[in-house]
Image (cartoon, grey):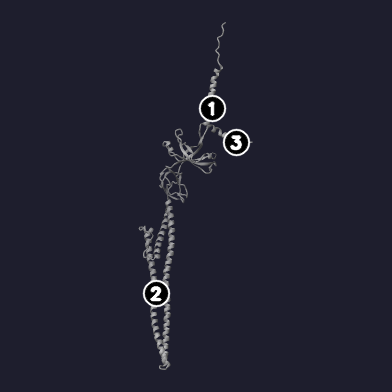
Amino acid sequence: MSAPAPVPHLHVADVRAPTRLGWWLLLAGFGGFLVWATLAPLDKGVPVSGTVMVSGNRQALQHPTGGTVRRILARDGDAVQAGQPLLELDDQALQAQAEALRAQLIGSRASAGRLAAERDGVEYIDFDPWLLAQPDDPLVAASLELQRQLFASRRQALALELDGLAQNLAGSEAQLGGLRALRSSKQAQLDVLDAQLLGLRELAAEQYIPRNRLFDAERQRAELSGLLADDTGRIGQLQRQIAELRLRAAQRREQFQEQVRSQLAEMQIRSEELHHRLAGVEAERQRTLLRAPASGLVVGLSVFTEGGVVAPGQALMEIVPQDQPLLVEGRLSPALVDKVHPGLPVELLFTAFEQRTTPRVAGTVELVSADRLQDERSGEPYYAIRIRVDESAMQQLDGLRVRPGMPVEAFISTGERSLLNYLFKPLLDRTHLAMAED
């Protein structure tokens, strides 16, 4: 019987070599992963949902007092330019009020011009340039003519009154001159008679003449002396009358000037008041024509009927500004507010477009609200943030039109960290709390 063939000897090391190689490869891969997870920087940031808005925000078109719609000059979706008329309210009541105030202002300024001429004592009225600039206005022309006639009649009446006083004064002065001359003549006669009496008294004493002659001469002197005293009294009376006439003339001039100055001051105050009132009414009339506050698109038109009534402060339409820098407005959780501040870079994804082909757009955090806000409906607290979109980055959208109100997903880059830091940071943050438990 032949011996069995020898079996070849297999070394154990040869069987275990692939296993060891696999373990080494596994360990090397895990070690490399740990090194990468420890050292490789990964972007960290804060995700925020928001909506697109424009730099100027929507601008509501309102009227402070309301009124009746006369014409609607724009419709939803119309592109309008700044200052373009959009809606007109009825202004008939304001127009009537403005015309009444203007008529009063014309009259008061014309009267003020006439009173100023009377105050200065000039022969012609220098009217307000505002009136002279409207020579073709029949209301202005009639008012100026009326004041010219009144100026002439008042001037003539005052002159006649002063002329009457002047004539009385001249008559009294003439009488005074005559009385003074007569008194001088009588005084001369009295002087002669006194000289005669002196001689007659000597002759009578020596009985060369009868005493009756002396008595006749003395009686004549007494009569002449009485007449002289009467003339002196009449002269005094005329002097007082002349002084009174002069005083009356001066008082009449002063009274006239005082009345003119008083009326002029009142008319100037009234003119100023009417001017301001008219300016206010005219400004209110101009506001009945509502114009676009900025260039943009009309949205939210709430008035559709001409003749309808508009309430005070009612939002009639809104203007969405065009060609303005785009902004993104979002809400940030209060737990993340310490990580976000103005100046941080942002990546924006406009989710209304095809996400697979739409690139991300760069932006910058522009504003973080100074205090926490609260949603009126849900009551959820948040911080408002505003992100400015880089205009140069918008060219990456290849003509896609971004509209206000579109949703946006924003990723605010707050720095870098490793994968291990990302995985273990929540656990490490909780460690001190876990150790504090009973």
Amino acid marked by disc 1: Gly
Q: Earlier in the sequence, mark 2 or mark 1?
A: 1
Cα gap from disc 2 to disc 3, whole angstroms: 118 Å
Q: Residue at x 52, y 28 (%)?
A: 33
Cα gap from disc 2 to disc 1, whole angstroms: 133 Å
Mark 3 nearby-residue class (10 Å; few <14, some 14–19, many ≥20): few
Q: Earlier in the sequence, mark 1 or mark 3?
A: 1
The residue carrying mark 2 is: 169
The residue carrying mark 1 is: 31
Q: Nearer the viewer, residue 35 or 368?
A: 35
The residue carrying mark 3 is: 432
Q: Nearer the viewer, residue 71 or 361?
A: 361
CB under 8 Å between callouts 2 and 3?
A: no
Tell me residue 303's x, y (percent). 44, 46
Compared across the picture, whether 433 is left or right of 176 comes to: right
Q: Nearer the viewer, residue 177 or 165?
A: 177
The answer to whether residue 28 is seen in the rendering is yes
Q: Residue at x 43, y 64 (%)?
A: 263
CB under 8 Å between callouts 1 and 3?
A: no
Q: Nearer the viewer, mark 2 or mark 3?
A: 3
Cα gap from disc 1 to disc 3, whole angstroms: 29 Å
Q: Which mark is residue 90?
A: none
Give the quarter of the figure containing the C terminus.
top right
